[in-house]
Amino acid sequence: MRRNFCIVVTLLAVAIIFSTLSFAAQSKDPETLIYATIGGPETMDPHWSYDTASGEIIFHTYDNLIAYKGESTSEFEPMLATEVPSAASGLIKDDGLTYIFPIREGVKFHNGAVLTPEDVAYSVKRGLIFDRAGGPMWMMFEPLLGTHSIEEIALEVTGVENYSDLFEGGDPRGELKAQYKDAMIKVYTNYIDKTVTVEGNKVIFHLAQPYGPFLNILAHCGSWGAILNKDWCIAQGDWDGKADGWWKYHDPENENDPLYAVENGTGPFVLKKWVPEEILILERFNEYWKGPAKLKSVQYYYINEWTTRKLMLQTGDADMIYVPVQYLKEVEDMPGVRVVKNLPTLSNTVSMFPWTINAEGNSYIGSGKLDGKGIPPDFFSDIHVRKGFSYLFPYEIFIDKIMHGNATRVPSPIIRGLLGFVDDPSLYYEFSLLKAAEEFRQAWNGELWEKGCEFNIFYNEGNDVRKAACDMLSTYAAMINPKFKITPVGVQWSSYLKAFLTEKLPIFTIGWLADYPDPHNFAPVYMGSKGDYSAYFGEAYREFARENVDPLLEKGLKENDPKKREAIYRELAQIAHDQAISLYLYQPIGHHVERDWVKGWYYNPIMPGEPAGADFYNIYKE
Amino acid sequence: MLSYIIRRLLLLPVILFGVTFLIFCVFSLLSPMERLATYVRDPGTLKNPQSTARLISKYHLDDPFPMGYFNWVKRLISFDLGWSQSANQPIGEAIRQRFPATLELVLYSIIPVILVGIWLGVISAVHHNDMLDQTIRVTAIIGWSLPTFIFGLLVLFIFYGILGWLPPGRLSSWAQEIIHTAESFRSYTGLITVDALLNGNLAIFWDALRHLIAPIITLSYISWAYLLRITRSSMLETLRKDYVRTARAKGLEENIVIHLHAKRNALIPVTTVAGMMIISMLGGVMITETIFNYPGLGFWAATSAQQLDYGSVISFALLFASIMVIGNLIVDISYALIDPRVRLE
């Protein structure tokens, strides 16, 4: 009995070792690339997608009208259009209100259908009516219709107060009330339908206002500009292209989105299999209009555990992996592994001071008075307070010690790589406890220095970088004046978001990742009266911004001359500095890690998933 | 017996109601804006000025507690569990996709747990206090006290990082490609080893097994160590019983005394513990699955909890509570079958 047991165990061990040896070679298939990363895509629908992981897959499966030229974020090349519109070629006219795109012929979708100009027009209009809450389509609405969503237009045309009031039982997924049907049809015919027209082989965009970054918005890398196949979409149960009933296809739940898990683009890869949060397989599209990719297959593995990803890279089971900055040292000296460093990303992290804090039921500001036990709600409306904090932060030390050198300083919301970026030393606040103390002494007529202050500053739990930033501010504040009691508090993301949206956070730190490489995607966010972050700085700031910032933002948006635009954004950078609107902590520097047999990688910071990922059309293995 | 089973099954909805109600109560402590965080990973995605209000209304985040719970139960009855933000797919689909993976892992882990745990427990008791007993006990104590995440990482590092034998995940990339894309491979059960055999594909069978070994070692070491201790104590107690002494006095061989007289009786309490252990393993595989990137229910449950994906957490709790109740019933019934002295009526 014991002998038999031993024989069975030995056979099993031999079988395992044999299988290990025979399969190890297969995993290094020269035509298959394995990419181990974190967090899988939310969707395959280009008009739903607003997360990097979905954008990365859509980048490889769909094409847009134009694309960025290689590593450039400002030069374009034709993609599904045969020409990049310009004023010189006459394809941008009417003072930037009309853009004309001649469409490439003979391009095939993955299902074999041939691309037509109607497909392009349908794609744009489908995106506009789809317009999901929290989605990316606001970017198309702004230039084409001068609004942010189709619901805004529906409210204007129908005259109701809430979009849900248009529907029986107040449920937008229910039946439309009969009395609003004609008005809702007009929303399409008078607005959406007029945004894009087809003339022969040309697709013409009609803008509501001149819009400097319009080509950036349409370019490949933005899933919202992807071109779909109209007939295929309709066959999937999607919008039929008609005015009557468009509202049934507006803002669906993810599970009711016909394009949630399927694709039919013209891109170099076809989606073969997607098991959410587990694996995604792309297969080469042999009829790609630029010629087939060198790789036959690309497999994404979604692996949250760092050790597992690292071991996969080490054993060669993964060709490319995502490496968080704190683990970079672990792979730098790994044999057979290439690490590309110092890649500037199009993102930044900023600590912001709301000029007026919502004091209602707000325990974060202590007594709510300048009595040494709290701060008044308008604490940061005093420029000396903001300047004091601007001098208080040890920018270089922070980048060196906390970011391990993987970041760089920027003086304003307009970061490196964008038009209007200024590396003027006079725009940077230096770390100086003396100057900080000097500013704080002047703040609130000297009362602040004398009485001191007490309040909380926040970071979202688990974000160690933001925690370190808060700790530094707190420590140096206490160092210059022991009466300055600033307590860093880590809260769950949900509580952080709630406090942010209700304008209760005294200082909050948050980041921004570019949607498209243009200063208009950054400056309004941090400085505009309606900015995604600055709109939560309280009424005092909004008033300031309406008067001093918004006119410049408007001018920058509508200006077509790059030189003039540059000057406008420089002026905004100067305001950001002079008013010490926020602490511009850093612009992260990224890195890319791959096995040395991977060739053809290049970096374009606006490409979704870069720098960890890649444009797999150009990649091959040796 | 039948009326006992019916009575127990009738209790199931009451227990499930209690479990889901409590979880729902916990989530209702969060404000609509806090629950919105599940849908908003970055406030930057709220670029449309109406987005916050639209999202709250779209996902009924401001429904009062009774309405929210009622709507959820209503959807549950129509087998619509909602959408999992953490899995990026419908919850029902997420469970259907992940359950076979966890089941396969647990089923294979049971074998070493039962065999090794009971076998070593008996040996340890029979060789009470001698060198063998001490060695087994020390091994068990190490297993019992070692945190799963440490032991798991150790196994991963040695058997994958150094030796390259036992890779993480559920399958190698070439096998993934076959099972996900080849039309010739059919999924019958979702248990890859079984499906591979049914498809006659031994290469995939071995590959799946190779990926299972490391998580099985991790999961079973801690469990068999516990079972060993229970078996050992029960066996020691049984060996001191009068009927064992009588059996020995009758001149029966020691093997017969131990295996036929003592072991059978000693295993009765062990059966209960082992049964419950197997059931709780189904819900307790979170750490093991996370370390080995094994795409099962535990991995998903851990991610859902981290992301405050309350729809998924509630569904997981519901599933686990159902398994616990039904599993408990099976254990009770098997207890009566093993020990004729036990009557359930």
Image: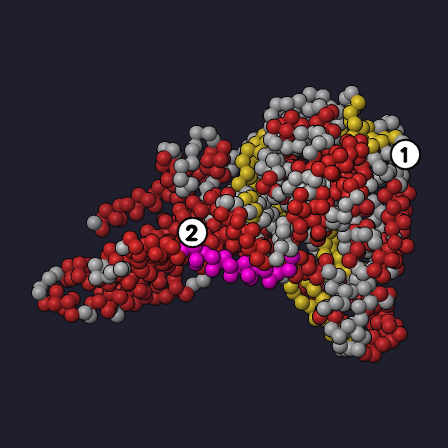
Q: Is residue A248 above or below residue A313?
A: above
Residue range (magenta): B12-32
Which circle marks residue A145 in the picture? none
Taking the image as shown, residue B208 lies to the left or right of residue A217, namely left
A69 to B29, vertically: above or below: above
Instruction: Name which residue type carries label 2.
Output: Pro
Q: Quadrant of residue B61?
A: bottom right
Q: Which secondary structure, mark 2? A: helix
Q: What whole-number distance in Å separates the C-alpha atoms at marks 1 and 2?
A: 65 Å
* Residue B24 among magenta residues: yes
At 51% from the left and 54% from the top, the residue drawn is: B314
User: Does A408 sit above or below residue A209?
Assistant: below
Predominant SS along the magenta part: helix
Position of residue A157 measured from the top left corner of the image (x, y, whole percent): 80, 40
Q: Residue at x 42, y 36 (%)?
A: B187
- Front residue of this view, candidates A143 and B198: A143
Point 56% across, 51% down: residue: B71
Indicate the quadrant containing the C terminus of chain A: top left, top right, bottom left or bottom right. top right
Residue occupying the far front of the picture = A179
Secondary structure under the numbered disc 1 in the rendered image:
loop
The colour scheme used here is secondary structure
Q: Specify the amino acid type for callout 1.
A: Asp
Q: Name the subunit of mark 1.
A: A
On the image, numbered disc 1 is attached to which residue? A95
Q: Is residue A415 left or right of residue B38?
A: right
The residue identified by callout 2 is B215
Q: Position of residue A502 (x, y in %)?
A: 73, 60
Quick check: can you spot residue B104? yes
Residue A476, image quadrant:
bottom right
Of marks 1 and 2, the one in the foreground: 1
Q: Determine if residue A566 is in view.
A: no
Residue B281's spot in the image, x, y percent? 40, 55
